[in-house]
Structures are given as structure tokens and as C-alpha cells.
Image: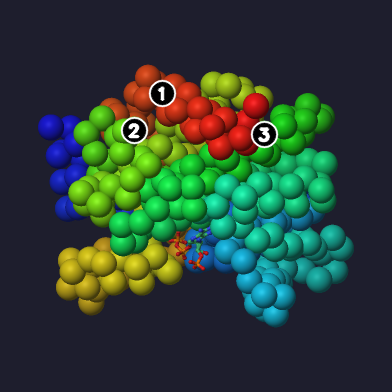
């Protein structure tokens, strides 16, 4: 019943992140991030890229790593130049004061492959001693039934399992950073209101190593997004020195709209009115930026919209599900020879 109620709420009303939450203005509220090191997955995409731009423009951290699907050298240079230009085009930019602009770097990451995730983490660790903020943002929606390289359902394998492995591989660096004076280390997980569409019980563990073709697209996406909330909560219990938080950005027309349109008749039919139901990228990223920087963020919480906790479904609040997912994940990664 709760699953049905959740699906109806999301389908009919959604959460527009339309300013009804806590007020957050990047130019006013992003504090100095001087000296901090940040890694954002999927930051070539719309929400991740704009988050990178705003953090660099107003917080000026030492470095931001953009971890996204492999690009050739020209592609990387073009993307980094584009982001850099936008950082400096902002009205807040003052050339005289900006003596230490943020260094932007690209790391290849394919979340559908354990090997690629391991390479990404190793490349990061080879370059950095610290990690202050990890944003697990990359994601797919409504992809045809398929599996990752290691055979997991594609949404679950990419949105959740690849990210979970990346976070595990970077945990030691984050914990070391947390011991530094004045540290405020955070893990921000980008989930979705769509977690309410997850199948009964939240996660169907016995089906995760299939393409789950009998589930609907929404259920497969929902399963991956509820897993991210469960992971965030359990990670927070196990690493209390790291502030962990999950967010829903709102509904925004981004790169994801392309795959939605391809696979969903409803999305195609409603495309002309979609702008009325969606918020701009600049609004969608407020929850990211708030979660990444606000002193008021409570670890272990899911926020939807900005700064409003506890709106996740009861399945997403289930501590038993979080523990079960953690144990299942450890067993899978051990089986793959990644964890001892
Ligand atoms: N837009 C919304 O309304 C909405 C609502 C709720 C939640 N979200 C969440 O917000 C996050 C960002 O999405 P977005 O709207 O900004 O979409 P987007 O523009 O499509 O960005 C997603 C990024 O993830 C990358 N990606 C795809 N497959 C990957 C892989 N195998 N390994 C590494 N990176 C991969 C994409 O690369 P390519 O572009 O090259 O494929 C893209 O750069 C997602 O987690 C999404 O679920 C979005």
C-alpha cells in the first residue's frame, strides 16, 4: 500500500524543489572551501557540471575532480575549459581577489565496470592526500534491460554498486582527512524521489544479478535509488566522522530527459509541458550545494527539497534493509576479489 501511495505521489505531484525548503543562495551561502579537495561523479552531465561551477565560483576549493565516462584528451580539455570559463564569467568572480582559482581535473570513470572504478580510485589516491567532499551524482534512468560488466542489473549496478565501490575505496582517504584540524568531510549521495517506485521491500536481492526485465523501468530505477539512501545511512553509522547525506534535486530537464524520452511514451507525450513541471538546473543543484556545505546538515538524513529531512518512504528508512544491503555488497565485492 505504501509503495502504491509513494508511486502515486511521485507520478502526480513530484517534488519540485521549488523553493519551498530552506532558502539557499550559492553566492551568499557557500562558505570558503579553501584548500579542500572534491570529487564529483557524472560531473560532465548537467547537474554535476553546474554544481562544480558553483562550488568553484563561490567556495574556491583547491581542486575539483570530475569523474565521468572516458573522453579523449580534446574532449576533456574542451569540457574543463568550458567549466573554467563559466566559473570566471560569474558576476562573483573578481580577478584581483581570485589569486588561487580552483584547479579542475578529469578522471575517467565507468561505473558499470569494477575495474574502471578501481582505476579511478587509484588515480585519485595517487594524486591526493585528502578528500573533503565526495558527491555520488552520476546516474542513468530508463535504460533498456541490461547488465553491468560483472552481471548486475544496469541501473542498480551503475547508480548504486559502482558508487558504493568507489566510496569504499576512498573511505580511508576521507577518514584521514577527517582527522585534520577543522575538517568537515562529507559524502553526498544523489538519490531521487523516484526511490518511492522501488519494488516491494525496496530491493529484490535475489534478482540483482539478472537484467530484472520483468520489473518496470521505474522499479529498476527506484531500486537503485533506494539502495543509495540505504547505503548512505549505513555508511554514516560505520564512519561517524564523515557527514553523510542523500538528496533529491527536484525534476529538471537534463541529459536524462533524452533516455526518458526514448523509453517512455508518457515522457514523450508530456514533453511539451515538461518545462512547466520542472525546475531549472540552477534550482535543482541547490540541494546538492546545501548538503555539501551547510552547517545544518544532519548526518544520515535524506533531504527533499532543500533542507527538509525525512520525506523518504518507510522502506527507505528501514535500518534492517541498510544492514542487509551493506552485508550483501561486502559479500559480492569479496566474491569479486576486491575486498579481503
Ligand atoms: N534530472 C532530474 O530530474 C533528476 C531527478 C532526480 C534525480 N536525478 C539524479 O541526478 C543525477 C544527475 O543526473 P542529471 O539529471 O544531471 O543527468 P545527466 O545530465 O544525464 O548526468 C548524468 C551523468 O552521469 C554520467 N554517466 C552515465 N553513465 C555513466 C557511467 N557508466 N559511469 C560514469 N558516469 C556515467 C553521464 O554521462 P553521459 O552523459 O556521457 O552518458 C552524465 O555525465 C543522477 O543521479 C539522477 O538520477 C535527476
Mark 2, residue position: 205
Precedes in sequence: disc 1 or disc 2 = 2
Label 3 – label 1 distance at C-alpha: 20 Å
Q: Secondary structure at mark 2?
A: helix
Q: Which mark is residue 324?
A: 1
Badge number at residue 37? none
- Image position, residue 116 (x, y; %): 62, 53
Q: Residue 47's spot in the image, x, y percent? A: 50, 61
The image quarter containing residue 306 is: top left
Which badge, 3 or 1, is on the more N-terminal residue? 3
Q: Residue at x 72, y 68 (%)?
A: 93
Residue at 31% x, 39% y is 207
Name the residue located 17 percent from the left edge and 53 percent from the top edge: 12
Tag of residue 171: 3
Q: CA distance from mark 1 to mark 2?
A: 9 Å
Please rate how many residues cluster around mark 1, counting C-alpha atoms within 10 Å: few if below 14, some from 14 to 19, many from 20. Answer: some
| Quadrant of the frame with the C terminus | top right
Q: Nearer the viewer, mark 2 or mark 3?
A: 2
Q: Is residue 277 visible?
A: yes
| Of 149 and 221, the residue lying toward us | 149
Name which residue lies at 69% across and 60% down. Answer: 107
Q: Element under label 3? A: helix
Amino acid at each position: 500500500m505504501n509503495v502504491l501511495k509513494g508511486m502515486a505521489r511521485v507520478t502526480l505531484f513530484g517534488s519540485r524543489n521549488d523553493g519551498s525548503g530552506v532558502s539557499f543562495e550559492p553566492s551568499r551561502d557557500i562558505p570558503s572551501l579553501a584548500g579542500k579537495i572534491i570529487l564529483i561523479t557524472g560531473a560532465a552531465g548537467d547537474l554535476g557540471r553546474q554544481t562544480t561551477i558553483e562550488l568553484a565560483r563561490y567556495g574556491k576549493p583547491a581542486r575539483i575532480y570530475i569523474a565521468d565516462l572516458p573522453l579523449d584528451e580534446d574532449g576533456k580539455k574542451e569540457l574543463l575549459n568550458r567549466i573554467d570559463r563559466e566559473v570566471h564569467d560569474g558576476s562573483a568572480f573578481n580577478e584581483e581577489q581570485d589569486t588561487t582559482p580552483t584547479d579542475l581535473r578529469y578522471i575517467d570513470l565507468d561505473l558499470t565496470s569494477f575495474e574502471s572504478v578501481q582505476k579511478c580510485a587509484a588515480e585519485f589516491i595517487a594524486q591526493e592526500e585528502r578528500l573533503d567532499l565526495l558527491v555520488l551524482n552520476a546516474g542513468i534512468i530508463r535504460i533498456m534491460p541490461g547488465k553491468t560488466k560483472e552481471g548486475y542489473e544496469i541501473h542498480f549496478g551503475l547508480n548504486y554498486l559502482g558508487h558504493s565501490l568507489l566510496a569504499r575505496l576512498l573511505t580511508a582517504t576521507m577518514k584521514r582527512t577527517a582527522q585534520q584540524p577543522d575538517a568537515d568531510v562529507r559524502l553526498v549521495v544523489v538519490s531521487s524521489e523516484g526511490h518511492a517506485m522501488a519494488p516491494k521491500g525496496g530491493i529484490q536481492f535475489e534478482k540483482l544479478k539478472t537484467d530484472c526485465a520483468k520489473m518496470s523501468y521505474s522499479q529498476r530505477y527506484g531500486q537503485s535509488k533506494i539502495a543509495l539512501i540505504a547505503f548512505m545511512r549505513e555508511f554514516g553509522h560505520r564512519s561517524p566522522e564523515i557527514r553523510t547525506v542523500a538528496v533529491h534535486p527536484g525534476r529538471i530537464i537534463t541529459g536524462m530527459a533524452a533516455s526518458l524520452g526514448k523509453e517512455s511514451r508518457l515522457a514523450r507525450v508530456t514533453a511539451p509541458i515538461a518545462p512547466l513541471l520542472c525546475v531549472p538546473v540552477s534550482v535543482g543543484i541547490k540541494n546538492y550545494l546545501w548538503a555539501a556545505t551547510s552547517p545544518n546538515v544532519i548526518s544520515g538524513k535524506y533531504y527533499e527539497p532543500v533542507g527538509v529531512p525525512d520525506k523518504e518512504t518507510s522502506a527507505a528508512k528501514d535500518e534492517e534493509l541498510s544492514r542487509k544491503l551493506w552485508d550483501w555488497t561486502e559479500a559480492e565485492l569479496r566474491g569479486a576479489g576486491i575486498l579481503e
